[in-house]
């Protein structure tokens, strides 16, 4: 097995998991959820494991996995949206501050240093 490919090793692990889970107690859902989270198995591999261990539970468990993945994706999307909103707010505040500093007669390079905006962005403010 020294020269086995990664794919061969992964297949061997899946077969071992199937053998272990067949001897496991009736309720394998917590184990299956753990495997999905930790090992990140794709749907095809996960279906194979479930089909071998609990064939009658395949659709129910796959549906639960899909819901969990969808919920996680939604949370990540919300988090990403919040981060983008924060960044946009910071950018708008920097532009507002730069405009105020320019109106007080401060130079472009000083405004750039204070606001964190590039000199090119500050020149654009002067045009508008």
Image (spheres, rainbow, N blue to C red):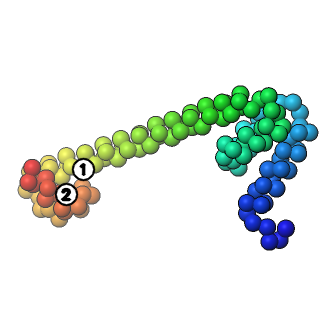
Vertical comparison of 42 with 58: above or below: below
Residue 38 image label: none
- From this viewpoint, which residue is outermost toward the bottom? 3
Measuring 78% from the left and 60% from the top, which residue is drawn there? 9
Residue with the mark numbered 1: 94
43 vs 126, nearest the viewer: 43
**Comes first in the chain, label 1 or label 2:** 1
- Residue 21 position in % (x across, y down): 86, 41
Q: In this view, does 116 lie to the left or right of 64?
A: left
Position of residue 78 in the picture relative to residue 16 (left or right)? left
On the image, which quarter does residue 109 sit in? bottom left
Q: In which quarter of the image is the N terminus?
A: bottom right
The image shows residue 125 at horizontal and vertical percentages of: 13, 53
Checking the image for residue 121, the label placed there is: 2
Residue 122: percent from left, percent from top: 16, 57
Observer able to see residue 38: no
């Amino acid at each position: 097995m020294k020269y086995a490919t990664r794919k061969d090793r992964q297949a061997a692990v899946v077969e071992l998991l199937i053998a272990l889970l067949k001897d496991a107690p009736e309720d394998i859902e917590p184990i299956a959820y753990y495997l999905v989270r930790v090992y990140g198995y794709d749907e095809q591999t996960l279906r194979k494991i479930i089909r071998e261990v609990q064939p009658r539970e395949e659709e129910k468990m796959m549906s639960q996995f899909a819901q969990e993945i969808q919920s996680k994706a939604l949370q990540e999307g919300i988090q990403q949206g919040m981060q983008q909103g924060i960044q946009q707010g910071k950018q708008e505040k920097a532009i507002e501050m730069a405009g105020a500093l320019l109106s007080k007669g401060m130079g472009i390079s000083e405004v750039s240093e204070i606001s964190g905006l590039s000199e090119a962005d500050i020149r654009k403010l002067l045009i508008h």
